[in-house]
């Protein structure tokens, strides 16, 4: 995470928010494109303080959230656990990449195994390597997570509205993929 | 979609920066005032000799700043919007309360209680982490969700590296002493 740090002051690491801004814009742009193309977006976070906030945000934008215990084979063993022909998420957004014992969430590794792109908010104690679109930022404070929720909800809603508008304008048929 | 917003933001920021620099330079440019900013340099022979003749870069600058102002007036974006932030991150950080505060030891802060579990008050004072304080004996029932309290900060994050550990162990909490409710002047 050193490349994302502005510096260290009084034993506190300061993230460079100019870099965060660029990363966040790329991540939101990608999320918007996935939502536009009717992808399934899954929000994951094991931070118990924000479970309700993230689940209600996911419901508000018509996407999915998994903020509870993650079973080992959810992604990698989906055909056995959920039956054949299960559709896996097309994007996984981590609002915190760590689980409750400060280890990396299993879903980061599993999404990489299953070729699912990931967006993740990485704090200074996280490892951004496996994420497709890491966003260096604060994942611990209430106002920070509320901001991310607001941005993702706004992005996804706008993308879906645009899709509906384009369908009406150009008469695109709804596709099954 | 976000790429569009970025392009618009950059364009707006560029326009605003140009406007600010126009204004600051026009303050100096008043020394070289001409009657009409859209005049071409060739017509300057007709102006009275009391006004200095513009040429080269100064003339081009006057011309383009006049055009920019006209465009701004037409677009209805004259004047800096109150929400514009053109400072770099370094400036914002330097002027932020976190840096202006210095060390957090023995600093008094105002926090808001956002959660209560029996006698434990979870107070958010604007730092990265919240602090947890015991409900005091005096005026205990006045401490409810949403009350503002005064705190004396001890530590912004309770973290330490223990023997034999590779990384620090953190409690994800700050440490502060509850001084009391925020005293508001009676109206």
Image (spheres, helix red, strand yellow):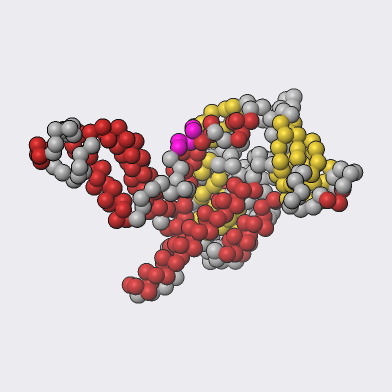
Examine the rendered structure and indicate whether residue B38 appears above or below residue B177.
Answer: below
Residue B46 at x, y percent in the picture: 10, 39
Q: Nearer the viewer, residue A80 or B54?
A: B54
Give left or right: position of B25 versus B107: left
Residue B127 rendering spot, x and y as whole percentages: 66, 39
**Residue at 26%, 42% in the rendered image:** B65
Residue A77 visible to an observer of this rendering: no
The residue at the point 45 percent across, 36 percent down is B88
Kindly identify the residue that appears in the image at 69 percent across and 54 percent down.
Answer: A69
Return the residue nearer the eye: A169 or A65.
A169
Give percent across and percent down for residue B42: 9, 39
Image quadrant in which you'd find residue A66: bottom right
Q: Determine if the magenta segment contains residue A146.
A: no
Of B141 and B132, the residue lying toward us? B141
Residue at 61% x, 44% y is A139
* Quadrant showing the C terminus of chain A: bottom left
Q: Which range of residues does the magenta coloring cover?
A: B87-91
**Residue A78's quadrant in the figure?**
bottom right
Magenta-colored segment: predominant secondary structure? helix
Counting from the top left corner in percent of width and height, residue B99 is at 59, 31
């Amino acid at each position: 995470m050193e490349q994302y740090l502005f510096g260290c002051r009084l034993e506190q690491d300061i993230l460079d928010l100019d870099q965060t801004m660029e990363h966040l814009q790329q991540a939101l742009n990608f999320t918007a494109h996935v939502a536009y193309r009717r992808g399934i977006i899954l929000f994951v976070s094991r931070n118990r303080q924000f479970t309700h906030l993230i689940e209600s945000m996911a419901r508000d934008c018509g996407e999915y959230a998994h903020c509870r215990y993650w079973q080992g084979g959810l992604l990698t063993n989906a055909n056995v656990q959920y039956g054949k022909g299960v559709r896996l998420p097309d994007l996984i957004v981590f609002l915190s990449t760590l689980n409750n014992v400060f280890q990396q969430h299993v879903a980061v590794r599993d999404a990489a195994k299953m070729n699912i792109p990931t967006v993740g908010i990485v704090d200074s104690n996280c490892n951004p390597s496996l994420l497709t679109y890491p966003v260096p930022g604060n994942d611990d404070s209430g106002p920070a997570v509320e901001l991310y929720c607001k941005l993702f909800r706004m992005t996804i809603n706008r993308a879906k509205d645009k899709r509906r508008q384009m369908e009406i304008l150009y008469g695109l048929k709804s596709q099954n993929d | 979609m976000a790429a569009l917003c970025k392009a618009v933001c950059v364009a707006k920021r560029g326009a605003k920066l140009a406007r600010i620099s126009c204004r600051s330079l026009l303050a100096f440019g008043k020394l070289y005032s001409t009657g009409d900013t859209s005049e071409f340099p060739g017509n300057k022979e007709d102006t009275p000799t009391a006004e200095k003749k513009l040429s080269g870069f100064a003339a081009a600058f006057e011309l383009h700043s006049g055009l920019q102002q006209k465009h701004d007036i037409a677009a209805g974006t004259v004047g800096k919007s109150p929400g514009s932030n053109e400072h770099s991150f370094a400036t914002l950080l330097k002027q932020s309360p976190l840096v202006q505060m210095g060390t957090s030891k023995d600093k008094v802060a105002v926090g808001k209680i956002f959660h209560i579990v029996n006698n434990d008050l979870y107070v958010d004072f604007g730092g990265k982490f919240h602090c947890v304080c015991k409900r005091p004996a005096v005026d205990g029932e006045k401490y409810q969700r949403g009350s503002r309290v005064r705190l004396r900060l001890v530590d912004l994050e309770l973290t330490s590296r223990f023997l034999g550990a590779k990384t620090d162990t953190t409690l994800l909490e700050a440490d502060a002493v509850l001084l009391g409710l925020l005293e508001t002047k009676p109206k």
